[in-house]
Image (spheres, rainbow, N blue to C red):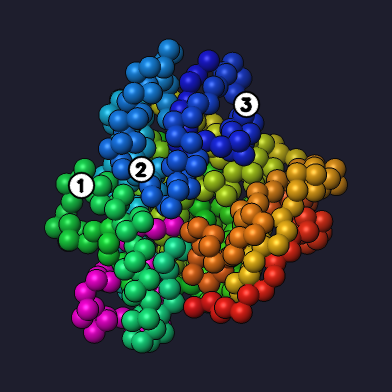
Amino acid sequence: MRNIFVMGLDPFHLNLLEQIRDEGEEYQFLTLYENSEIVHPPDLEYPHLDDIRAHAGELFASFPGAVDGIVGYWDLPTSLVLPLIARDHGLPAASPDAVARCEHKYWSRLEQSAVVPDMVGRFQAFDPFDDDSVAGVELDYPFWIKPVKAHSSFLGYYIDSPETLRSHLPTIRDRIGIMGRPMNEFLAELDLPEEVAAIDGYHCIAEELVSRGRQCTLEGYGWREEIEIFGIIDSVRTGRHGSSFSRYQYPSTLPDDVQVRMCEAASSLMRAVGYTGAAFNIEFYWDPDSDRIRLLEVNARISKSHSPLFLFVDGSPNQHVCVHLALGRRPQMPKGQGSFRLAAKFMLRYFENGLIERVPTDNDIAALRQHYPEALVRVLGTQGTRLSDLDLQDSYSFEIAEIFVGGDSEQELVQKYEDIVERLGFRIAPLQESMP
């Protein structure tokens, strides 16, 4: 029996982890932190990293068996603290320095510019607390601005004028510390290069628009000196600025030569940052008109959103890779052994504020599974909640459910999704409040 501690474990992801099958091996997955403590803490007040590390030390010391590995598949603070805990206890993981070169968006852009300059747009650091910062913008409008550490497009804004930028500064100043404070605690553990040291977690990065064409995500891992890409997932966007995800679909339908070029770029970059012993994902855009590839961002973790998709198509979730790496092994990820040719995660979104009047009951979901046995549904809101009160939404939409399905064609996936939404019976009452 191998004992694997999991950051932010919950029943949904425990069920996925328990689908991992390795001949001659048994795994016990144990909670390092509850999901409600580390992923969605009250008032979004994340635990301090030192407290997380101390808790891990106490838990490991009192555990009666061997601690064989730790895994995580959530973003901040999990992606930052996990390599520190691994270092504290001599467990396999990527180095904190390599993780920082991916997770600090400004530092990551510097690394990308040195390795794949043709895939990186113009960018600059931006201090939202500097009253003169708007005048110091060197990029042409429009551009995107976001914190140097965030996820789920949190505090990410489309900026088309100095006035628009100024209008968002109060919100950025008020909320950037939610993720900025844990990021600074992580950076304090590192020996930062001079060009990065002054750009802390309370800074933003302004970036030239690169979101043209088709988006996809490469899932991979570093093993010693090698970089392996084990899956490519298409990302379909929607919304006023094309900034909100509509669905993820696996496997990618991008041309083979485009996928090869992306894999080569990802491998070169991750070798350059010294990323080994852990999984990662990298987002790219391909513009079919110009045949140009742009690199959007790097994440030092798998995407949990893709986990059921790998299970449906390949026969095991992408956590399979994390578990093997956590045990100090080269991953052996199955391929094409699932029940479906394709799989998708759909995000049910609303683009105006509203009040959730009805969410699906357990009976609704059980009845749904009678029609679509493979379907997985995660409801993200509760009855009586205003959409604007949901945590960690992107700046232009509200996500109220995740729906995972498998099928043998894209048309089948979309038809299943539309039928599932109707069967679930969400009801949202409009509120007369516009999005920013």
Query: What's the CA distance linking mark 1 and mark 2?
Result: 16 Å
**Mark 1 Cα within 10 Å, few/some/many (few <14, many 20+)?**
few
The local secondary structure at tag 1 comes to loop
Tell me the residue at 34%/66% (across/down): 174
Foreground of the two, 431 or 310: 431
Q: Quadrant of residue 87?
A: top left
Q: Which residue corresponds to mark 3?
A: 21
Q: Which residues are magenta?
A: 125-151
Residue 385 drawn at (x, y percent): 61, 60
Residue 289 drawn at (x, y percent): 55, 78
Tell me the residue at 50%/65% (across/down): 394
Q: Which residue corresponds to mark 2?
A: 47
The amino acid sitting under disc 3 is: Arg
Residue 436 drawn at (x, y percent): 49, 78
Tell me the residue at 30%/30% (across/down): 54
Kindly identify which numbered label has been placed on residue 188: 1
Foreground of the two, 227 or 78: 78
